[in-house]
Image (cartoon, rainbow, N blue to C red):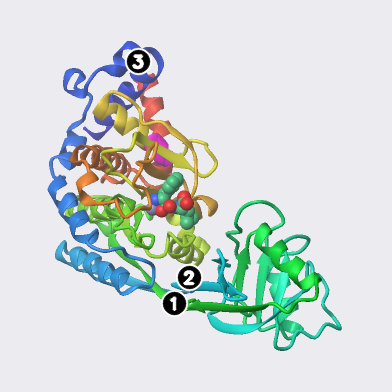
Amino acid sequence: MKKFLLAATAAATLTFGTVGGAALAAKPAETGFQSAMDQRIINQINVDNIYNDIDHLQQTPRVAASEEEYAAVQYIKEKFEEYGYEPEIQEFEFFGYTAPHTVELTVDGESLNTLPFTYTPSGEVTAPLEYVGLATDLTGHDLTGKIALVERGAISFADKVVNAAAAGAEGVIIFNNAAGVINGTLGGANDNFVPVVSLTQADGQAILSKLNSGEEVSASLTILGAEASMRTSHNVIASKKPNNKNKDNGQVITLTSHHDSVPGAPGANDNASGTAMVLELARVFKNVPTDTEIRFITFGAEELGLIGSRYYVNNLPQSEINRIAANFNLDMVGSRDAGDLVMRTVNGQPNLVTELSQASSLRLNGASTPFAQGGSSDHVPFGEAGIPAALFIHSPLEPWYHTPEDTIDKISKEKLQDVAQIVSTAIYDYARFDNKGPKAKKEKEAVSTQMYFEESLK
Ligand code: BES
Ligand code: ZN
């Protein structure tokens, strides 16, 4: 029975993919290629569960290491438990920085337009200004009790600040060497930094000509609320093990999302949508017989640079990485205002995830979901570790991306339903219980294609 279905699936793929150009637009209801296997999963998906979980999660932003992110972690854990899992919470630390809430600069009593440099410490300094050029080498300079006025160029902002601070400066002002403001970063925290802000080229040069004419110029610099510190975030992991230990093929499919958001954004689509879909598919798969482990993971601190997923992958021994057959990563899967579904792989090449999903989308919708190269989400650490991985996202992005407008009213149940169907049937196609051993499983696609040829030549 299973063999027949495999052959039928391959036949459908080949027919549409090679000779069935006109048939590409045909709907599954008309063509009947949506298999009973697909139906078994699709019938269990309840899109209202996804929608309601998005609604719950998007009540507040969920910035990594915040109380709100931790509340989301607890909610996800409880949902997994409600569905019969024993989730693990994986804690990790990272170095974080909070930008200041107050930044002021006055020079001789006049308030000037300024921006802080990322990683500046907080501080309040009032002192005379001393111009030190590019601050490339300040040995022999004594800037004790001064604020250093520095021009942009030649060396990094961080090196300028370290050099001025080493010479005794209590604060630093860096002015631009071209038009416009500097929105700069010191690249990372450093205990040797002193408070530092930027100025425009015009303002910097106006101060410089006063200094050059022998005037004493005094500045007041106020930076409040900036904080660099170690922080704690969490990944949530729930595992659906193969039902029969004797038929365990030893492989793992990971279905992932990130649950954190950027500051100020409720993140309904980015990425309560992916997280809520992971939860619903965990519910759907809980009692479905499989010979492959399905591991559901929601990551913290993605928006700060894929920190949670990198921590997860970096802490797997190579033997565990070798067991992971695929990573399906859901990030921004429900916006009514975004474009069509695409898959993004790290190297732009097809892999097991894109192949399974192209086959399932073709069976379900009569058209294969396209793929292209792309990063910027949690599939990247998996892909870089050599695991077949893809991001599921709609493109182009909605205008609400990373804004306070990323809210539940922009979420489309149709989009959610479509992605949930394509991904769950792709996963089931690989993970469902069959009699094949581990080696054959990894070659499943090739095997089924071969079967089709054998059948068709008869
Ligand atoms: N949800 C986005 C995913 C994404 C991918 C957006 C591709 C746009 C294009 C993700 O959360 C995100 O915003 N990623 C950051 C980079 C990340 C490493 C901090 C981005 O793309 O700016
Ligand atoms: Zn995201």
Image-based side of 243 in relation to 348, left or right: left
Dominant secondary structure of the magenta stretch? helix
Image quadrant containing the N terminus: top left
Q: Nearer the viewer, residue 261 or 127?
A: 127
| Mark 3 or mark 2, earlier in chain | 2
Distance between mark 3 and mark 2 Cα atoms: 65 Å
Q: Position of residue 336 (x, y in %)?
A: 26, 39
Q: Is residue 402 magenta?
A: no
Q: Quadrant of residue 130?
A: bottom right
Tell me the magenta residue range. Answer: 352-356
Amino acid on which the number 2 mark rests in the picture: Ala
Closer to viewer: mark 3 or mark 2: 2
Q: Position of residue 123 (x, y in %)?
A: 55, 82
Q: Position of residue 287 (x, y in %)?
A: 17, 54
| Mark 2 or mark 1, earlier in chain | 2
Mark 1 residue element: strand
Do callouts 2 and 1 mark residues in contact (Cβ within 8 Å)? no
Circle 3 crowding by C-alpha within 10 Å: few under 14, some 14–19, many from 20: few
Residue position for label 3:
456
* Residue at the image point whose x is 20% and y is 37% from the top: 414
Residue position for label 2:
99
Distance between mark 2 and mark 1 Cα atoms: 15 Å
Looking at the image, is 37 positioned above or below residue 242? above
Looking at the image, is 11 positioned above or below residue 352? above
* Residue 411 visible in image: yes
Q: Nearer the viewer, residue 166 or 131?
A: 131
Amino acid on which the number 1 mark rests in the picture: Arg
Q: Quadrant of residue 191?
A: bottom right
